[in-house]
Image: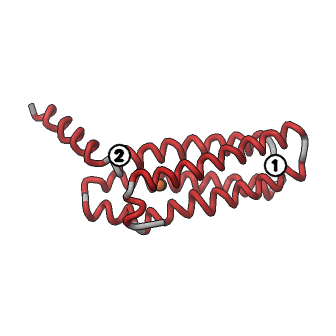
Amino acid sequence: MSGPSLKKQDAHDLIHESALNEAKELRMLLQKCVEDGQKEKAIKVAEVSIEHWESRTLQHASSEEEGLYKEMVTEKPHLKTLVIQLTRDHDLMRKMVEQMKALLINNEIDEKLVSLMDSLIIVDSLHNDDEMNKLLGHKEFYKLEIAEESDEIA
Ligand SMILES: [Fe+2]
Ligand SMILES: [Fe+2]
């Protein structure tokens, strides 16, 4: 989904929620496999989790960078700094998924991978909040900024 659809706050938030909920379920499943010593199953869950992050959240991030973010900056140039910050969040998530892959390649399917997934879930969740509240709820954000600037002038 890109363009106008991602501009709709509700539809966009649903994409976030469904991807994040699946990520949380996979994280819980991985933890159980690690705790129960189910090595083979843990490897499969780790593979599915990486595939999940790549095909859902990272793919969504690339679509945003190619479409929504550019459109928003063109329409509202004051959002440029925010878009740079949101893109940095995407980059951090990309790096974390790369770290997950490295752990999988090195056969380190343990608590380290579970805690990396926890970090990824936290970063994604904070990022989604900012996208909803600051980027797509930018009118309120902009008004607040103007109000703060007026206070400084006064
Ligand atoms: Fe995003
Ligand atoms: Fe998004």
- Mark 2 or mark 1: which comes first in sequence? 1
Residue 114, quarter of picture: top right
Foreground disc of the pair 2, 1 = 2
> Percent position (x, y) of residue 86?
43, 52
Q: Amino acid at mark 1?
A: Glu
> Percent position (x, y) of residue 28?
73, 41
Q: Residues within 10 Å of mark 2 (few under 14, many from 20)?
A: some
Residue picked out by circle 1: 108
Mark 1 element type? loop
Considering every residue shown, the one lying at the far left of the view is: 154
Residue drawn at x 69%, y 61% is 51
C-alpha distance separating marks 2 and 1 = 38 Å
Residue 147, quarter of picture: top left
Residue drawn at x 65%, y 55% is 97
Q: Is 20 drawn above or below residue 4 in the view shown?
A: above
* Label 1 beta carbon within 8 A of ligand 1: no
Q: Amino acid at mark 2?
A: Lys
Q: Is 87 positioned to the left or the right of 134 in the image?
A: right
Mark 2 element type? helix
**Which quarter of the rendering shows the C terminus?**
top left
Q: Foreground: 45 or 114?
A: 45
All told, the count of numbered labels is 2
Residue drawn at x 69%, y 40% is 115
> Percent position (x, y) of residue 144?
24, 38
Tell me the number on the disc at residue 134. 2
> Percent position (x, y) of residue 58?
57, 60
